[in-house]
Image: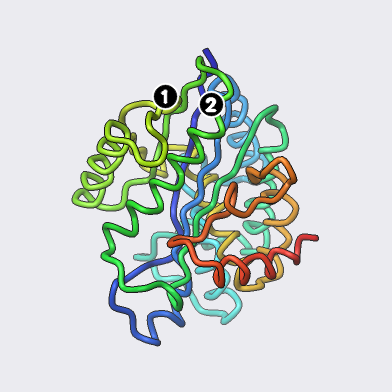
Amino acid sequence: MGVFFAFSDENGEYQQKRTEKFVKSHPYFIRATYIIRGMEWKLLSQRYADLKSARGLPLDKEIKWSYVWSLRNYQKNNRPIPENKDFYFLKDFDYRELIDFVKEALGLLNDLDYKKVIITVTYNHYCPSINEVNLYKMHLQEHMQRIEMELQGSDENLAVLFLDPISKKKNELLRNAYHLLYNKGDFIENYRHIKDSLNFENSHQSVGVQLADYIAGCFSGFLKGYTRSVEMFCEEVAPHLRTSQGDDPFGYGIREVPRENNVRNIIRNIYQRCQ
């Protein structure tokens, strides 16, 4: 049996009722998942720890994508970091070192024999009024479908999906949505290649989820045209996107939610930055 781990995390925010100010501050809601062989998880985990040690970063602390950019804002403006900030422990590091660390961490995927990335994105400017929970379910469903289709080549393949917790209420709603889809199906009649229950891992305790955070974060920065994010995404993430037989990631490794041709064309044009 081929056992696979799929780690997933989100970036950005979504609200059903959105003001112009909200959309300007939060243009996207993104979920990113990457799939690896279970047998390669130890290798990934060890090399991630080695990378942190080599850079003098604490092994027991999570370096979130948001921490790096919050640190950047404080340092570029020469402001002291308040002790109550979650990223205070990074105060003695230069933000540029941490950006380099994130890029190197994403580069660890190159060490694996098998890796596939799936990204879903909601453009808040174009999205109709969809209940928040329903939108989260829509994102989850897209990832379930693509993991199932990716692994259906062998009856023995099985994937276990790990997510970063959102909140107790939303976690339970996602568990129930996953369970319902798994048992009732959608256009996929039977989910035979993913485990029957959803798993949540605290990101600070999960190397797998931390890397999913970096994938979602750099894709957000890529869409916004941030130079280092574009570099990271094009060099370390885009080569691992799930694609069609014709190497097209759209609809396979990158999916707009809800489906909307105008939004897909916008992302496709942005994607040319990697060409």
Query: Above or below — where is 24 with respect to 183?
Result: below
Residue assigned mark 1: 192
Query: Closer to the camera, 30 or 75?
Result: 30
Element on which disc 2 rests: loop
Query: Above or below — where is 224 with respect to 170?
Result: below
- The answer to whether mark 2 and mark 1 are in CB contact below 8 A is yes
Q: Residues within 10 Å of mark 1 (few under 14, many from 20)?
A: some
Split into 4 quadrants, where in the image is the C terminus? bottom right
Asked whether residue 19 appears in the rendered view, the answer is yes
Query: Above or below — where is 21 with respect to 90?
Result: below
| Residue drawn at the location 22% of the way across and 47% of the way down | 173
Query: Closer to the camera, 79 or 142?
Result: 142
Left or right: 107 as drawn, with respect to 125: right
- Residue 249: x and y, percent? 65, 51
Residue assigned mark 2: 152
| Residue drawn at the location 60% of the way across and 24% of the way down | 40
- Residue 93: x and y, percent? 60, 59
The single residue placed furthest to the right in the displayed view is 275
Left or right: 34 as drawn, with respect to 166: right
Left or right: 262 as drawn, with respect to 23: right
| Residue drawn at the location 67% of the way across and 40% of the way down | 54
Q: How many marks?
A: 2
- Residue 36: x and y, percent? 57, 31
Query: Above or below — where is 228 with respect to 189?
Result: below
- Residue 239: x and y, percent? 72, 46
Q: Quadrant of residue 198?
A: top left
